[in-house]
Amino acid sequence: MKKNKLFISILVGLVAGQIFADSGNRPFSIINTMRIGYDDNIYMQEDSESASMYFEDGVDLSFNASLSDRTDILFRSLFLFSTDNADTTLDPNLYVVLSHSVSPRLLLQLSNVLRSGHAGGNNTADKRYDYWINTTTFEPTYVLTSKDRVSLPVSYEMKRHDGKEVEKLDYTTAKIEASWERELRPQRTTSSLNLSHKMTEYDNRDSEHDSTRLSVGLSHTFNQEWHGTIGGGVAYNQPDFADTPGFSPENGETFSPEFNAGLTYVPTPRSRISANISHGQSESRAYTYGSSMVTELELSAQHDFTAKIMGKATARFQQSDYDKDDSENGKGSTESERMQLELQLNYKINRVNFLELRYKYTDKSGDHGEWDQNRIDMGWRVEL
């Protein structure tokens, strides 16, 4: 597994080098960040005493290049090497977008996103486990008028876990969507109408979940300081548990409301405050349920104290509700909650070198595992 990850990083480097050689102006950047810190619960378990020092080194490579007068490529990668008392890992994260303008009205875009990392602290696994998620999307966009555009994105996503205890959480989804966007006021107000259908299959258990969504959205810039978004709709959910005795797909069919809202306030060029809330159906993180209804709230604030010192604070709250009608084994409704607080202070030494001090607190509670975790580290970032 580690040899495969290393091979991927070498291959990406060779491809990037070839494109740099062909592009002439070398439009790329490299950021390397090394961190050393302390984690009081590396296994993310209840009543755990698995404290450890840890070391991380993240290499962030990004570039964009024009392959022709109509074709562009955007590439970004983050290879994160980490080691502590639990394990030594190399987690690749890739983001690639290939865009081609067929005509002034028709744009084709193909993208692939690979994310990997580790998690833990639920009733499925006894310790921390690794996972990866790969999403491929093809999106044609057509400009109808100067104010209207439509897009038809199609995506395919896979999530895989490393370990027998958590392989029941593996899933594969296919999604097709139709979206219409209209500019109501130039550079001020935009509306959208979306219709999508997603099919989810849990690969290591005989379980499926389909969801059809219809939603509308509105985005508005009030002035230079305030910007807001709001959206809402309804989802038609259809679980299918073939292994559950007596399960009838008709009994599990439900309609659920979905909404999202966001507000950004920029009082000065040195300060930024934002708040976002959302509620909707998501893939299940508990293997006895087909899906979950997730409510998320995020608050963040950023301020440049001086030309060299910047501070940032983020608070996230998440609640996942599991309905008894969506249970594979007939169990009742349950819920899970997660709260995360992150504080970061950056100091700019010069144009290239930066120092970072970071603290993160996570608390998870509910029927699918309970634990809390404190992480504090100091980092040195070099931007080239």
Image (spheres, rainbow, N blue to C red):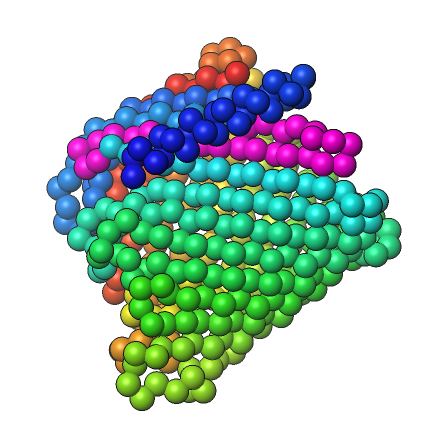
Q: Position of residue 230 (x, y in %)?
A: 63, 58
The vertical placement of 307 against 141, above or below, is above
Q: Which stretch did the figure color magenta?
A: 62-87
Q: Position of residue 126 (x, y in %)?
A: 17, 53
Quick check: is 83 in the magenta stretch?
Answer: yes
Q: Is residue 112 at least partly visible in the picture? A: yes
Q: Residue at x 37, y 65 (%)?
A: 202
Residue drawn at 15 percent across, 40 percent down: 50
x, y percent for residue 149: 78, 55
The answer to whether residue 332 is above or below residue 109 is below
* Left or right: residue 35 compared with residue 49: right
Q: Nearer the viewer, residue 238 or 190?
A: 238
In the rendered image, the vertical position of residue 350 relative to residue 247, given as above or below: above
Q: Position of residue 142 (x, y in %)?
A: 78, 54
Left or right: 28 as drawn, with respect to 353: right
Among the 4 quarters of the image, the one containing residue 295? bottom left
Q: Residue furthest top?
A: 350
Q: Image quarter for residue 62?
A: top right
Which residue is depicted at the point 30% across and 81% down? 244
Image quadrant where one finds the N terminus: top left
Q: Is residue 332 visible?
A: no
Asked whether 182 or 133 is in front, the reply is 133
Left or right position of 71 against 46 = right
Residue ID at (78%, 45%): 102
How many numbered circles are shown? 0
**73 drawn magenta:** yes
Q: Describe residue 206's horizontal placement relative to residue 22 as left or right.
A: left
Main SS, magenta residues = strand
In depth, the one of 171 and 276 nearer the eye is 171
